[in-house]
Image: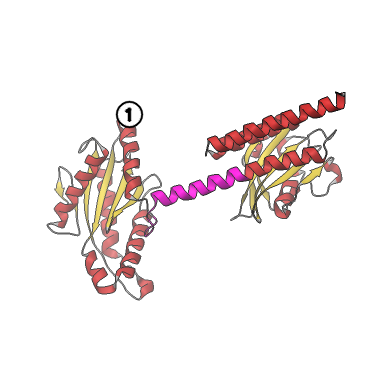
Amino acid sequence: MTEAAGTERKRYIAEMNIFHDVAKALTSSLDLASILQTIMEKMAEYFRPDTWSLLMVDEERDELYFAIAVGDAAEKLKSARVKMGEGIAGWVARHGEPLVVPDVRTDPRFAKRFDQMTQWETHSIICLPLRSKHRVMGVIQLVNVSMDGFGENEMFFLQSLCDYAAIAIENAKAFERIQELTITDDCTGLFNARHLYKTLETEVYRASRFGQEFTVVFIDLDHFKQVNDTHGHLVGSKLLAEVGYAVKARLRLIDYAFRYGGDEFVVLLPQTGKDAALVVAKRLREMFRSSCFCKDEGLNLNVRASMGLATFPADAHSAHEIIRQADEMMYVVKNSTRDNISVAKRGLVK
C-alpha cells in the first residue's frame, strides 16, 4: 500500500468513526444540547479549528445568536448578536449557501467588529448553513482551520455533519411540540391535570427537602352551565379560554395555572404561605367581579368563582391530599355563598 493510499484509508476510518459516534448520539438521546455538543466536538477533533461556534437564527429579531461557542473568544461571544446578512455567518444564514474563506482580509463580507470584541485574530473561516427544508435554522462556523489539503472530500464530510446537526434540531423541536401537546389543555392553553400532578410531586419533594411551603388554589366557576345553556358551547369554550388567560396574567413567573377539567382551574403558588396566597386569591376574586368576558362575541359576560385554598405542609403531606383539601374548601364556598374563598383550617373569608 502506498503512503498516499494509507493516508486516505486513515482519513476514511476517522470519518466513519465520527459518523458512527454522531449517529449513536442521535439515536440514543433527545437532549439537543448534548447531541449538538457531540457533533461539534467531533467536527473540531477532525478539522482542528482555533475556535468554532454554532449560531442559531432568532427569526423574530432577524438575528443570529451564539448557541455554542468554544475557544479563547467563547466567553465574550455568548451575549453577542449577529444581524442577518452581517459578516460571513450572517451572509451564510441569509443565502443558505456554504462559504469557505481562506483569507478573510480579501473578503469584504468579513465583519471585523467580532475580532475587536474578542481580541482575536481571524485568518480563515469555514461556514455552513443548517437547513430544514427551505429554511435556515442556523450556521456552524470553524475559524482558522488549516487550508492545506482542504478540498471537496472535506467539504462533503463537513456538510454531512451539518445535516446531522439539522436533523437533531428538527427532532428536538418536534419532540418539544409533542411534549407541549401532552401537557397543555387545547381550550385554554394552560397546563392540564396530568401535568398538574407531575408538577405537584416535584413541588412536594422540593418543599420537603428545603423546608418550604407552597399553596394550591382550587377555582370553580359559578353557574357556568348557564353560559353553555344560554349562549352555546362555543361561547362557553371562549369564556374558559379568556378566564384562563386572565388568571395566568395575574400570577408571578414562578407560579403555575392549570385547567383541571370542565370549568375548574388550579393555581399552584410555589414558596408561598397561606397569608400571601390569600392575597393572590383575593386578587383573582376581584378580577372575576370586575371583568367582562366574550366582548368580541358581542357579549359582556360577568362570571364569578368559588375558590378553595390549602397549604403544604400545614394542610396536607402529598400531591393528591393537597388537591383534595383545596377542592373541599372550594365546595364549602360552592355550597354556601359562592363568589368567595374558603381557607383550610380557617373557613370562609369575610
185 magenta-colored: yes
Element under disc 1: helix
Which residue corresponds to mark 1?
209
Residue at horizontal 14 percent and vertical 52 percent from the top: 332
| Picture quadrant where residue 209 is located | top left
Q: Position of residue 288 (x, y in %)?
A: 28, 61
User: Which residue reaches farthest left?
Assistant: 336
Question: Does 247 appear above or below 162?
Answer: below
The residues colored magenta run 167-189
Q: Nearer the viewer, residue 52 or 154?
A: 154
Is 26 left, or right, of 183 in this rendering? right
Residue at horizontal 58 percent and vertical 45 percent from the top: 169
Q: Position of residue 116 (x, y in %)?
A: 74, 39
37 magenta-colored: no
Q: Is residue 49 visible?
A: no
Q: Is residue 102 visible?
A: yes
Q: How is the image coloured?
A: secondary structure
User: Which residue reaches farthest front?
Assistant: 1
Q: Callout 1: 10 Å neighbours few (<14), some, many (20+)?
A: few
| Picture quadrant where residue 65 is located | top right
Q: Position of residue 295 (x, y in %)?
A: 36, 72
Residue at horizontal 36 percent and vertical 47 percent from the top: 256
